[in-house]
Amino acid sequence: MNELQILLQAEQWRRAGRGVAIATVVETFGSAPRPVGSHLVAEESGLFCGSVSAGCVEGEVITAALEAIAGGTSQFLEFGVADETAWRVGLSCGGRIAVHVQRMDDARLAALSRARAELAARRSCAVATPLDGIGSQFYTAWKDAAPPAVEAQLRVGESGLVRHEGKRLFVNYYRPGPRLVIIGAVHVAQALAPMAALAGFDVVIVDPRGVYAVDARFPDARLDLRWPDEALPAIGLDAFTAVAVLTHDPKIDDPALSLALASNCFYVGALGSRATHKRRVERLKANGVSPHLLERLRAPVGLDIAAVSPAEIGVSILAEIILARGQKPLRSLLPQAAPSFAGCETRA
């Protein structure tokens, strides 16, 4: 369940008249199971969704959430490997997490509803929450004026703690969920589409060939039977979108690649051998695609994991897309350092 779905669930509970609390990871130290900005929401009967620790301290956080619903007082919780609570519930990763728990009042509901609307429109946004004392002032930072510290955090494009007038604010930066546009309803797409959906991607398969793009082959997928030059502008290729071109048919692949490479989508990959790719590059250059844009094209598509079957190729493509989205090099390509135990705590 992604952050947009978690916020939607909280909003639905609150609008149904239930008491709701939202818990947020506001700081991590060392190895932590969930990143800063992760949410868990709970309603008054104990139902919850989301996660702040991948299961390690959820029970304690839900208890604090129910207390916040009943009493209205926010809580700031810290868990680490040396804490009795953490040992009991299994936070044994060696790090620490700080979690802020607060009842969802009308102001919070309005701020998160606006955030969810922005995300649904595929625009990034942020909400800043006061952590010191009880308060319900939230800065919605995509249109409204925000303190300089909040604006600076927005430019970073990450969630994090800031200080304003001596008080702590947590800036929760939200970005639209990732989307994968697959060009070609081929065998690889049959494997790639459900894996990408499971990984949290909104998947669209574009293929004008009705014999390929049928519900029987893609029972749970969103199919678009238009040609890429019509479908892609309608879908919209933004910075949160990846495009994987798989048909081997230049009439379909080339227009799709021309549009994708000219957009600001974060990943463009194309299936095919090196010889096929060489001919593809020649065609794209002849059609006016600049060498600078062609440098963005990842081909042969996917990480080199000796993939052979459609499912293995799907795994390699999805892995490369996730890597590109994280903008992080593979650990195997980084200098190897000796293991460090400086952040560990021990118990007698």
Image (cartoon, rainbow, N blue to C red):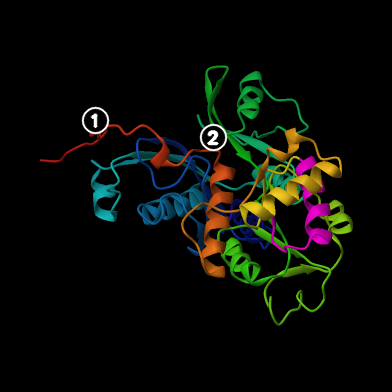
Look at the picture and state if 224 lies above or below 171.
Answer: below
Q: Nearer the viewer, residue 301 or 46?
A: 301
Mark nearer the N terminus (1 vs 2): 2
Determine the main secondary structure of the stretch shown in magenta: helix
Instruction: Return the residue at label 1.
Output: 342
Magenta-drawn stretch contains 87: no
Q: Secondary structure at mark 2?
A: loop
Q: Nearer the viewer, residue 60 or 290?
A: 290
**Mark 1: amino acid:** Ala
Q: Secondary structure at mark 1?
A: loop
Magenta-drawn stretch contains 249: yes
- Quadrant including the C terminus: top left
Q: Position of residue 13 (x, y in %)?
A: 63, 61
Q: Which residues are magenta?
A: 244-263
Q: CA distance from mark 1 to mark 2?
A: 36 Å
**Mark 2: amino acid:** Ile
Is 45 positioned to the left or the right of 288 in the image?
left
Q: Which residue occupies the extreme top position in the image?
A: 165
* Residue at the spot 59% in from the left edge and 69% down from the top edge: 191
Instruction: Return the residue at label 2.
Output: 134
